[in-house]
Image: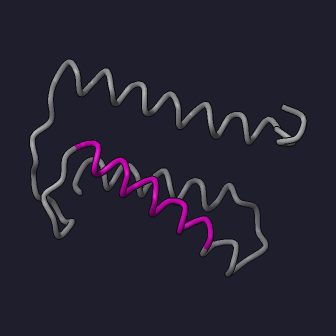
Amino acid sequence: MNWMAWTIPTAGFFSTIIAILTAMTIWELKSPSVERKGFLPIKTTRGDRLFIGLLSSAYIHLAYLTITDATLWIATVISVIWMVVVMRWG
């Protein structure tokens, strides 16, 4: 694994994604989701909203890197807030 140059933040990031996917899988098995329409222009399930939230969080980070050289923790906080909004009201 040395060729990947793992760091603590990188390992934490991927561990968090794996934990989220595992939790969502268990939740889906215990309580299957139904499609609903929130502020997003399409009907979505929990999994759809998770995917949309993760993808848009990546774009938030890329845009933040383009705009400023400040710490990425600010973009991470913005992304977490965005994920909560998408998962709850999306």
Q: Is residue 6 left or right of residue 78?
A: right
- Name the image quarter holding residue 2: top right
Q: Position of residue 25 (x, y in %)?
A: 33, 27
Q: Is residue 41 magenta?
A: no
Which quadrant of the figure contains the N terminus?
top right
Q: Left of 29 or right of it: where is 85?
A: right
Residue sitting farthest toward the right? 2
Examine the residues drawn in magenta and state their main secondary structure: helix
Image vertical order of residue 18 relative to residue 42, above or below = above
Q: Which residues are magenta?
A: 46-62
Q: Position of residue 44 (x, y in %)?
A: 18, 53
Image position of 40 (left or right of 71): left
Name the quadrant containing residue 64.
bottom right
- Identify which residue is drawn at 31% across, 21% down: 26
Q: Is residue 2 above or below residue 87?
A: above
The foreground one among 68 and 5 is 5
Q: Residue at (11%, 58%) from the top-left corner? A: 37
Query: Is residue 55 inside the magenta stretch?
Result: yes
